[in-house]
Amino acid sequence: MTSSQVDIKDPFAGERLKESPFHPRQALLNLRDAWSSWNGYKFADYYYDEEYEYFCIRNSCATYDICPMQKYVITGPDAEAMLNRMVTRDISKLKENRVTYVCWCTDEGRMIDDGTIFKMGPDRFLLTCGSPSLAWLRKSTFGFDQLEISDVSDSLAALSFQGPTTCEVLKKMGLVGIEDLKPFCISYFSLGSDDNNRLMVSRTGFTGDLGYELWIEKAYALELWDKLYAAGEDYGIQPYGEAATNMARLEAGFIMPGMEFNEALKTVHYQYDQTPFELNLDWLVDFKKPHFNGRSALLEARDQGAEYTLVKLDIEGNKPAEESFLYSDKECSKEIGYVTSAMWSPVVKANIALAMVMTSALDGDIWAEIYYSKELRHHSKVAQCTFQTHPFWSPKRARATPPGLY
Amino acid sequence: MTKYDAIIIGAGHNGLTNAAYLAKAGLNVLVVEKNEYIGGAAVTREMHDGWFYSSCSYVCSMMRQSIHRDLNLTKHGLVLVPYLGTVVFADNGDTMVSYNSEEAEYNQLRRRSPHDADAMFRFQADLARYAQLIRKTLLRTPPDPTSFRPRDIKELLWLAKEFWSLGEKELYEYIRFFTMSAADFLDDYFEDDLIKAAMASPGVIGTALGVYSPGSAYILLHHVMGDVDGNIGAWGLARGGMGAISHAIASALTEHGGEIRTNAGVDKITVKNGKAVGVVLDNGDELHADIVVSNMDAKRTFTQCMDKNDLPPGIYDKAKNFKIRGSSGKVNIALSGLPKFNNVPDNRYINRGGQGFVGSMETMERAYDCWKHGRWSEDPFIESVIPSAWDPTVAPPGQHWMSNFVQYCPPVLADGPWTPEKRDAFGQTVINKIERYSPGFKDLIVHMEVRTPHEIEAEVGLTEGNIFQGELTIDQLLFNRPFPGYAQYRMPIKNMYMCGSSTHPGGGVSSACGANAAREILIDLKRPNTVPEDDFYDE
Ligand SMILES: Cc1cc2nc3c(=O)[nH]c(=O)nc-3n(C[C@H](O)[C@H](O)[C@H](O)COP(=O)(O)OP(=O)(O)OC[C@H]3O[C@@H](n4cnc5c(N)ncnc54)[C@H](O)[C@@H]3O)c2cc1C
């Protein structure tokens, strides 16, 4: 601030990207001002170095601001039935204080979005997802009167806290019994400053590693941040951005909208969106439960079999197969698919990718035509791909309760 | 006296395009234009010292890019510049701004309605899908669905394939789309009235329909199917005004050896032995040609410039009943400075874009009610843009010209013919409304040109002042345009063609009608085709 600074009115007041409740702390750490955006929020691409942040997820612990994620609280006697008709999974089996991964489809069985449902009480659910979904939620309430949907995206702050030392840090922060929290379970704690600041902790995440998500009213967001960072100081705590998330989720084999699937409601070209079967999400579709949206189309799709299937590939060499075409032969004469996400995995030391491959070609050879550049000159190579059935990264601690010492 | 290979009646942008492609194919062509200037409804005129008005059309997005490139219009002086940002005004003074930044736009919508903010994604995807299909038909001659000629069958199959590629559900939706009202269509997406009114307004532009009238949904699509450099739905300004488009095409035409004669209105198309053989001008001059192409609208062509006895039975009546009701006026205003609007953030991205005085769905419909009763709207819908904020060539530095497109305004008033007094009263209604949202606006006015459908008809020859040379409803679209059976640019008289917006794909500055007609003429003459195919960014 210079002394000559005059009071200039911001000509774009109200139109700038919104700042998350954690922004004051995160901005201090965003050395390069590397901001992108998500749902109208200013949102870090990375803070210091994407690879460093990625290694914090795998090696120590790191926080990821999920305030821009969309969050809806659905309450009332019809809440469960409505959600159960909307999503493809049977959530009537979901117990209180549990979380489940779901997806929902159009009448044509094309995937609109995926997300998680938290059962917070008998008639009280939290739905979280990447894209705004209020309009679809409202459409889905047709015939159900006894429920209320409130969009808490802006009022409920959330921080994803991931990595091997997370449990220790939370213990140190005073969350007594956190080590007993099982994957996909929810527990509540008090931050201690007054009675309202109830902290909800779920053992969830998007990294395939040990991790938690911390949920709190936005007024207490900074208090949470400060306590967490104080406790995490000796455990390598660091914020991470979109870039590191994308690396971690790919190693875990998780899909991303805009990468693996095109949200059906935003798709212009016929069938450029996907069914859950194409995305290998068969396990999310439960035909035994009562009617749900897209059911008959999905039945048909299941019986027909998916034309393409999402697969995990281990690719020879070290050049990421970004945007590569896939072929059944080294000569690249028969195209059988395309890569959706690719990277060199620093922790697995493998050249990995997610790809859409014609189901009929899954038994044969898969070759990727890879373009890369070396000091401005473009090169290409053809690399053999090996089909992987398990996530590239899936440490025991991610599932163990207690997770054990890092 | 020289005999031309082809005479084109009217130097509208379509007439000029048609002539340019015929000249490019080596034909000896003459364009005759009744006005002393060219361009028709795509025109720029200096109406006040240093102020150049685009008197009729004012923004551009339908111009076929392949024609732009093929005729080398850039070399001939044409530059199209996208403009950003629109503000819509509600009756209560409330405003909504559209930004070209997805995030700013999303935040803006979300403040009005979180529901509508995310419904907008689906709306945009659906519109893009429909628009894409229509866009593909623009530079193609509609097939005749009753014909068994291989070319028609091939074209019908192509059309069917394109339709089927939408998928079954969307196909049904699409068919509904043609007959729906803009309001019904929007109800499926939005709840906020101002958002609906803003989205509905393109559905009535240039049309004698209201936002609740069946058919208005398609017109909405017609206005968003264009693009600027692949940005679907975006609108641009022609540097130097819309006349720059016509002048660039004219320059390409003369480079190919074509000739343009202004102050040369056509009185009659001469027909001998069932064949068009030339024209008689208003001054009595007779001109001869193997082919006569009319750039005039269908109604004017057949009911004013032809002898009823020269026409096969039925055509005269079809032309007489051609739906071409005028509904819009235009008020062009020279301003001594940039107007300031209430409740509009003072930032450079939007205070220089467009303004939509929509009010509400109710206000838009009430405005239409006035038209039905033969009055101009007391509280009209106005679509404005200030091109001088982007284009340094159309007004003196620091001063501005504002284009105001006004609905509704009837071609004939219930209380008798238009008079200069009534025209000026209409102009007052418009500036009074703007003043409501921009106090002090009137003090900025340096000069003003008020145009009702009456003036538009008198000057451009658009019957009843209908801006599209015929309404864009399903009964007058595709193979029904202008009349069923005559949608392939050939008219019921041999050697006579039409090339104006009365033909497929209809109104707007696109050059498509003129180019399509040229392709058909060259087929009949067994000459090599000079008209390019359309090209698309998104395939
Ligand atoms: C007020 C207004 C606003 C518009 N706004 C837009 C817009 O913003 N964007 C857009 O894309 N479109 C707009 N349009 C529509 C668009 O301008 C027209 O559809 C398009 O310009 C028509 O071109 P045309 O060549 O087919 O016909 P016209 O431009 O109508 O050309 C016909 C020509 O024939 C001449 N003529 C008529 N009778 C005779 C005769 N007897 N002898 C000789 N010559 C004759 C006329 O003088 C005229 O030059 C608008 C139209 C109007 C009127």
Image (spheres, coloured by chain):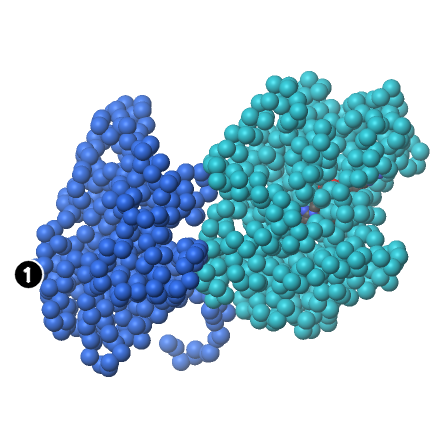
The residue labelled by disc 1 is A405
Q: Depth check: B123 or B531 in front?
A: B123
Q: Give neighbour class at mark 1: few <14, some 14-19, many 20+ (Cα, 10 Å).
A: few
- The vertical placement of B396 against B508, above or below, is below
Q: Determine which quarter of the picture holds residue B253.
A: top right
Image hue for chain A: blue
Q: Tell me, by letter, which chain the rendering colours cyan.
A: B
Considering every residue shown, the one lying at the far right of the view is: B284
In the structure shown, which secondary structural element does the residue marked by tag 1 occupy?
loop
Q: Depth check: A217 or B18 in front?
A: A217
Q: How many marks?
A: 1
Q: Residue at x 83, y 53 (%)?
A: B412
Q: Is residue B199 visible?
A: yes
Q: Determine which quarter of the picture holds residue A201.
A: bottom left
Indicate which quadrant contains ligand 1. Answer: top right
Amino acid type of the residue that numbered disc 1 sits on in the rendered structure:
Leu
Subunit that carries the residue with mark 1: A
Q: Position of residue B112 (x, y in %)?
A: 50, 66
Considering every residue shown, the one lying at the far bottom of the view is: A194
Q: Determine which quarter of the picture holds residue A358.
A: top left
Q: Position of residue B185 (x, y in %)?
A: 56, 51
Q: Position of residue A345 (x, y in %)?
A: 19, 45
* Residue A173 in the figure: left or right of residue A90: left
Q: Position of residue B429 (x, y in %)?
A: 76, 65
* Residue A303 in the figure: left or right of residue B43: left
* Residue A35 in the figure: left or right of residue A365: right
Quarter the N terminus of chain B occupies = top right
Q: Residue at x 13, y 67 (%)?
A: A178
Q: Residue at x 24, y 55 (%)?
A: A93
